[in-house]
Image (cartoon, helix red, strand yellow):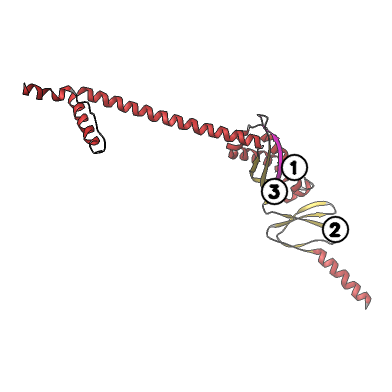
């Protein structure tokens, strides 16, 4: 009786070691007596007990959070930058045989690349050229992890931590830039107004009667204000005909 129970338990252990079920996003790297024989899955996988060994590998995209890195920019400013990388396994056999821990190795590559690449840029470039820097980071990390069977699809800089003194300097610089633009816009407006006035004066100079009509129009506009006394200079040419007639 006990012998039968022991045999059943032994057979159950062998059977459980033979059968493996892999999900759609999983693959199994199978070794037979230490030698790689192939990649299995998804679905039902049958192994030879005590001879075959299988290592599961997920093919889903992995989100890797790159911890903050202390970086000195090309213009000698110390900043702290963190990023996020997205990668996935393309060759399960290489991931297992070429590198011991592919997630840890990818994380280390991302950190060192982040420090070396961002140190080549000035602070203004880090703040304004993120898309270009992200693309360069993705390309460099992808080239370094490609022999491991890993594809890096995206790298994004999340946050650039700037010292407080530098933040105040950037704020002052931005304020000065806004004032400069405001003065330029005001000067352009004054220049355009002067051009218009010059053209108007030239046109009025060609027809003296228009100057007199402009005087009358101005007098009409001012006359609407009844609470003040207006002394308006009248050109002598305007009243000369009346004087001659009276004489």
Asked whether the viewer can see residue 186, the reply is yes
Q: Which mark is residue 148?
A: none
Q: Relative to 98, say whether 178 is above or below.
A: above
Does the residue at mark 3 contact the one at mark 2 (Cβ under 8 Å)? no
SS under mark 3: strand
Q: Position of residue 33 (x, y in %)?
A: 85, 54
Q: Quadrant of the rendered structure where residue 204 is?
A: top left
Q: Residue at x 87, y 71 (%)?
A: 9
The residue beneath circle 2 is: 51
Quarter of the image with the C terminus in it: top left
Left or right: 82 as drawn, with respect to 180 = right
Quarter of the image with the N terminus in it: bottom right
The residue beneath circle 3 is: 64
Q: Residue at x 79, y 57 (%)?
A: 54
How far apart are the alpha carbons under marks 3 and 2?
35 Å
How far apart are the alpha carbons under marks 3 and 1?
11 Å
Q: Which mark is residue 108?
A: 1
Residue closer to the observer: 102 or 68: 68
Magenta extent: 63-74
Left or right: 214 as drawn, with respect to 170 = left
Farthest-out residue, right: 2
Q: Position of residue 188 (x, y in %)?
A: 40, 29
SS under mark 2: loop
Q: Nearer the viewer, mark 3 or mark 2?
A: 3
| Residue 67 among those drawn in magenta | yes
Q: Earlier in the sequence, mark 3 or mark 1?
A: 3
Q: Residue at x 59, y 34 (%)?
A: 170
Asked whether the viewer can see residue 89, the reply is no
Q: Relative to 140, say whether 63 is above or below.
A: below
Q: Earlier in the sequence, mark 3 or mark 2?
A: 2
Mark 2 Cα shell of 10 Å, populated few (<14), some (14-19), many (≥20): few
Q: Position of residue 176 (x, y in %)?
A: 53, 31
């Amino acid at each position: 009786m006990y012998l039968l129970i022991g045999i059943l338990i032994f057979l159950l252990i062998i059977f459980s070691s033979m059968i493996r079920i892999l999900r759609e996003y999983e693959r199994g790297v199978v070794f037979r007596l230490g030698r790689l024989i192939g990649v299995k899955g998804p679905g039902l996988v049958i192994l030879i007990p005590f001879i075959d060994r299988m290592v599961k590998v997920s093919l889903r995209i992995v989100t890797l959070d790159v911890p903050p890195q202390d970086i000195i920019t090309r213009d000698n400013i110390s900043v702290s930058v963190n990023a996020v990388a997205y990668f996935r396994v393309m060759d399960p056999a290489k991931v297992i045989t070429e590198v011991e821990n592919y997630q840890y190795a990818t994380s280390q590559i991302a950190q060192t690349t982040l420090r070396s690449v961002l140190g080549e840029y000035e602070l203004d470039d880090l703040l304004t050229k993120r898309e270009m820097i992200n693309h360069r980071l993705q390309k460099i990390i992808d080239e370094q992890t490609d022999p491991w069977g890993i594809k890096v699809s995206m790298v994004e800089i999340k946050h650039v931590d700037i010292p407080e003194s530098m933040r105040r300097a950037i704020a002052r610089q931005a304020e000065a830039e806004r004032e400069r633009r405001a003065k330029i816009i005001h000067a352009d407006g004054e220049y355009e107004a002067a051009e218009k006035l010059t053209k108007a004066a030239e046109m009025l100079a060609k027809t003296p009667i228009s100057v007199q009509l402009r005087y009358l129009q101005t007098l009409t506009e001012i006359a609407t204000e009844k609470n003040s006394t207006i002394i308006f200079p009248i050109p002598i040419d305007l009243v000369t005909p009346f004087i001659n007639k009276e004489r």
